[in-house]
Each structure stands twice: as C-alpha cells, then as structure tokens.
Image (cartoon, rainbow, N blue to C red):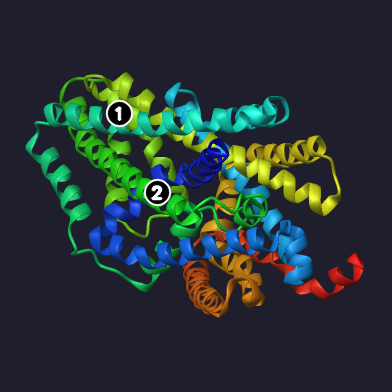
Amino acid sequence: MRRVHLLMAVLIVGYMLGVWNFLVVPHYLITLGMKGFALSLVPIILSIGLIYLELESTRRSRYMMYEFLTKAARKPGIAITLLMFLFMMVGINAYYSGHALNSLLGMNQAYAALLGILTLLIVGILLLMAKGRTLDFMATVSVLFILFAVASFVLMRGAASSAITNRQSLRYLEAALNSLSSFGGTLTVANIAQLFVATIVVFGMGVGFYYVLGSFMPEEIDVKKILAVVLVLEVALSFMASFIVVYSLGFAHQSFKESFFGGAPATQSFELYRHFNQLRAYTTNSSMSVVSSMETVYFIPTILEKGGMEGADRIAWLLMLSIYLAGLTTLIPLVEIGSQITAEMLQLGRRNSVFLIIVLGTLMTAIMYLAPVRTVLLAVPFGVGLIIAAVEAFPLLSEKKVLGEGAKAFATLSLVVFLLMGLAVVYRELRVMGLYGRVGIVLGFILLIPVLFNSALLKTRR
C-alpha cells in the first residue's frame, strides 16, 4: 500500500512540475520581484484549494469524472470543454518539450515539432506496453529532472561568477538580481491578471486531471501533504530557473561585446547581440508576449557555447534535459488521464482511447511548426485559461453534501475571482495582441460552447 501511495504522489508531482516552471514563471519572478511573488500566493492558494476540492469531490463520491459531471453536477458539457482543452495542452507541452531537445542538439527550430511528435510516440508506447511500469518510470524521471535542474543551477552559478568580469555586464547581472529580490516592482491590473493565468497553467488546471485522479485515489493518501510538497518544489524550481536566466543575461552581454571587439564573424556577433536583447526584454519587460518570452530560455545553450563559458556543454545538457524530462513527466499523466476521460465518454477501450489522444496530440504538435499557429494555440491557455479553470470548478458548487458548506463558499469565491481576472486578461489581450492572438481568444471561447448545451446533452444521455 505504501508503494501505491508513493506512486500516486509521484504522479501528482510529475504532472504539476513542468516546462512552465522554466519558461514562464522566471519571467514574472524577475520582472515583478518579490512583490509579484507575494501577490502570486493569492492565486496559488486559490488554485491549490480548488485542486484539493476537485480531488476530494470524486474521491468521496466514488464517481468517475464524466459520471460525476453528468449525475452529480448535471453539467456534461463541461467534460467536452475540458477534453478539447486537454487536446491542445498535449500538443503545446509536446512541442515545447521537443524544443528543448532541438535547442540542445543545435538543430533548426523547424525540428522542434518533429521531436515533440517523437516524444508523444514514446509516451504512447510507455502507456500501452509498459502498463504497470509507467509510474515507476515516471518516478525515476521525476527525480532525475529535479537533480538535473539543481546541478545546472549550481554549475551555472559557479561558472558565471568566474566568467563574467566586464563591469557593464556585471551591472546587468546585478540589476536583474536586484529586481528578482526586491519589493520595488510595479504592479498593474494586467500584471496581476497574468500572474493568475501563469498559476493555473503551471498547476495544470482546466483539463479535468484532478477530477479523474480523485476517482481512483486511495482514501488513506494525505492529499494536503502531497500538495504542500509540490508547492515547495514549484517555488524552489522556479527560483533556480530564474537565477539561471539572470546569470545568462550577464554572460550574454559580455559575450556579444567580446565577439564584436574580438574579431569574431559578424553573424556570430549579431546572433549573440540578438539573444542578449531577447534576455534583456525577458528580464525587464513584464508585458512581453508569451510566445517570445517562452522561446527565450532556449537560446541559453547557444549563448553559453558561442560565448565560450567553461563547462558550457554540461550546463546546457543538464538544463535542456531538465526541461525535456519535466515536459515528459507532464505528458505521461496528461495522456493517461485524457485517455480515461475519452474511454468513459466515448465508450472506447484503453488502447483505442490512448491511440486517439496520441493522434490528436500529434496533429496539434505538428501544426505548431507554424509560428502563427503557435501564437493562436498559446493564446487559448494564456488568454482564456482562467475562464476555463473557473468552468472546471463550477461543478463543485453543487457538492455541498459531499464537501460541506465551507468548501462550497471557497469554491464560489475562487470561481468569481478567476472569472473576473479572466475577463480582465481577455480585455487586455484583445487590445494588445495581433490578429493571431485574437483568433486564439476566439478559439478559447469556442471551446466553451458545449457548456451552453448541458440540457440537450442530458436529454441525449437519457
């Protein structure tokens, strides 16, 4: 029984610690500082609370997710919305996991989608062939990626402290460190709303994962302790990733300066200068677009290698493998849970449901090869994600008999806050985004259409 408890804990930890801790969270930690981190505790508390209630709702009622949404909440349309959002998140996670290998191998960005598809195929083989060994594999990979992340941070800190000697480069480094550790960051309504969005994306909300997990979670497992451990790991991992970005900024500035005045080829000097500007925007501009900010971290291996940092290969391998393995440990449970939802809703066998999720995820990953499509798809979670998370939490309002009045009050408060912040994000994004971003917002609202037809879906089920 203890082994089952451990594996369930690994499943939750592996799912919640993902690529977003490396790509998205450092951007907000550095630009908004400790004031932003302190404020982010609000959406973190609300998110953790909703996750706990979603787990408990199906664990106590002993319903499967679709059964719970149909019989208890009488909202089957929500299940369809969550499943469509899950398809998108599988493709997005696979692409940015593949992007880590692509960056590590120094390949053209066009191959990121191909490597993401290969990763999805690996996940499918593991789920269909390994069966009971999949969670053991996840446990090993989860430990490895955390160790790799810690090792890359330690090596990067040591190498940067001895390599960065230029005064102006040190000033850039110190300015970023001060921004990360100070309470002087400027917060706006848009910043606050984006913090909420980043939180729900990092915690993997909006896809029904926790409802499904709760339906087969043993009653003896202390969910609160697991969530507390995850929260500590989330914070530690995000701050380590932030420091890696800060050190990379200082070294990038010194590298392009030395390249310009050291007689290096003009193409190399320009590339280093471009990467430095990207990192500078990442660490100073809190309103930087999601697509640009997410792809900034993937420039770090190139900066370290062409700048000639000692141990560049080891640091790059450890960092990019950390990101890749983090994505892999998110994809495995995401595909597994998606297949269970699909099997329940469409009455498919396990093999067919896993195959369906892999095929749809592969299509999503493949079309992300196109930059405009990436912008459209990323605008869904980062534009409408809060509203989808609020819709996911809506069934909790009908579960006061199972969860109690206090739980219902907390769920109501969280849902209202998420909706208000979600509308603020949509309003802001529609004003500042280009055409493709706006198309993504519209696509996100299209995912919500099944929610409007709950009555018809209930009649069909009868």
Task: Reply above or below: 246 against 311.
Answer: below
Q: Amino acid at mark 2?
A: Val
Give x and y (percent) for residue 328: 54, 34
Give x and y (percent) for residue 79: 73, 61
> Which label number is shown at residue 151?
1
Give x and y (percent) for residue 55: 59, 58
Q: Left of 347 or right of it: where is 319?
A: left
Task: Reply above or below: 282 against 75.
Answer: above
Q: Nearer the viewer, residue 56 or 15?
A: 56
Work out how far the residue at label 2 is from the one at label 1, CA to CA, in angstroms: 20 Å
Residue under the image location 75 percent in, 74 percent down: 452
Quarter holding residue 195: bottom left
Nearer the viewer's eye, disc 2 or disc 1? 2
Crowdedness of circle 1 by 10 Å Cα count: few (<14), some, many (20+)?
some
Q: Amino acid at mark 1?
A: Ala
Q: Quadrant of the C terminus?
A: bottom right
Residue under the image location 14 percent in, 38 percent down: 169
User: Can you identify the residue that label 2 sits on?
Assistant: 229
Q: Nearer the viewer, residue 15 or 316?
A: 15
- Does residue 179 appear in this view? yes
Q: Left of 397 or right of it: where is 453?
A: right
Residue under the image location 43 percent in, 31 percent down: 143
Closer to the chain start, of discs 2 and 1, is: 1
Local SS, label 2: helix
